[in-house]
Amino acid sequence: MNLSDRLEAELNEQGCALLPGLLDAGDCTAIAALYAREEGFRSRVLMQRHGFGRGEYRYFAYPLPDPVAGLRERFYPVLAPIANRWHQAMGLEPRFPATHGEFLQRCHAAGQTRPTPLLLQYDAGDYNCLHQDLYGEHVFPLQIAVLLSEPGRDFEGGEFVLTEQRPHMQSRAEVVPLRQGDAVVFAVNHRPVTGSRGVYRVAMRHGVSRLRSGRRHTLGVIFHDAA
Ligand SMILES: O=C(O)CCC(=O)C(=O)O
Ligand SMILES: [Fe+2]
């Protein structure tokens, strides 16, 4: 099974898929260290100010640093066929072009020109409320988060959580066990699930449980740009 087929099978069954060891420890440390630098970012968000949780994040500015730009370019073509089948299954119109460059042109033409890849930083007591990363009309339906810190050594608590809200049913939560360098691919806003009466849309949200101690960094890779 190739990577795209494996991810599609996991995404269709669980709503998320793992990419173990996507980055090595050296890359993780180097990317996390960017957080403290002055340059390279377009904005900083203190989550508590907006009711998003507690902790902070910074959006990268263009040009994105190599590993971040590389992940967007490399994974878009793997995920676009899955995104197209999801849209077909959910009866949604937009189809996604073959390359990330073409998709970005579409975002930029619609005024979504600001880069969305971000670095997040959590300290003890911080958490990220369940949310969806929607930034305008154009939405690529899958995104990736990479854990840059090592659980147990750098921090405790702070688990990546996904919830699925099925129509007329109770919500289901999934905790995704990640080690440093592991990534999770997940649905941005909804995904198709086949039930006895056909396909229905399940709304997905993601967040992070409270950090018990230490410091945790994550790299978020979102494929659409922001208005
Ligand atoms: O810190 C995390 O694991 C979640 C980050 C997040 O919300 C994102 O990448 O969109
Ligand atoms: Fe997010």
Image (tube, rainbow, N blue to C red):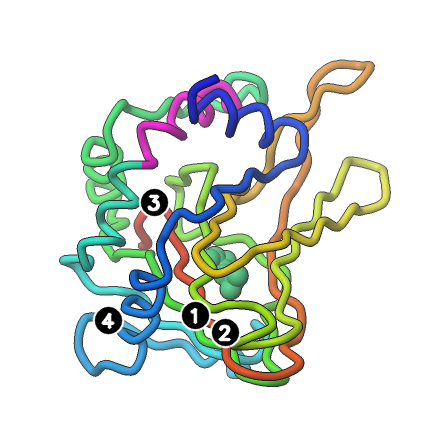
Range of magenta residues: 75-87
Callout 4 crowding tier (Cα within 10 Å): few <14, some 14–19, many ≥20: many
In the image, the residue with mark 3 has its CB under 8 Å from the nearest atom of ligand 1 = no
Number of the front mark, 4 or 2: 2
Give me the residue at 59% from left, 80% from top. Answer: 126
Which amino acid lies under the numbered mark 1 shown in the image of this protein? Leu
Which amino acid lies under the numbered mark 3 shown in the image of this protein? His
Report which residue position mark 4 lands on. Answer: 41
Contact flag, marks 1 and 4 (Cβ < 8 Å): no
Which mark, residue 220?
none
In the image, the residue with mark 2 has its CB under 8 Å from the nearest atom of ligand 1 = yes
Report which residue position mark 2 lands on. Answer: 216
Residue 142: where, in percent of width, then height? Answer: 47, 39
Which mark, residue 224?
3
In 3D space, how far apart are the residues under numbered discs 1 and 3 (Cα atoms)? Answer: 18 Å
Does 159 lie within the magenta span?
A: no
Which mark, residue 120?
1
Name above or below for residue 92 compared with residue 211: above
In 3D space, how far apart are the residues under numbered discs 3 and 2 (Cα atoms)? Answer: 25 Å
In the image, is 64 to the left or to the right of 215? left
What is the secondary structure assignment of the residue under circle 3?
A: loop
Residue 203: where, in percent of width, then height? Answer: 66, 41
Instruction: Looking at the image, tell me whether mark 3 or mark 4 is earlier in sequence order.
Output: 4
In the image, the residue with mark 1 has its CB under 8 Å from the nearest atom of ligand 1 = yes
What is the secondary structure assignment of the residue under circle 1?
A: strand
Contact flag, marks 2 and 1 (Cβ < 8 Å): yes
Instruction: Looking at the image, tell me whether mark 1 or mark 3 is earlier in sequence order.
Output: 1
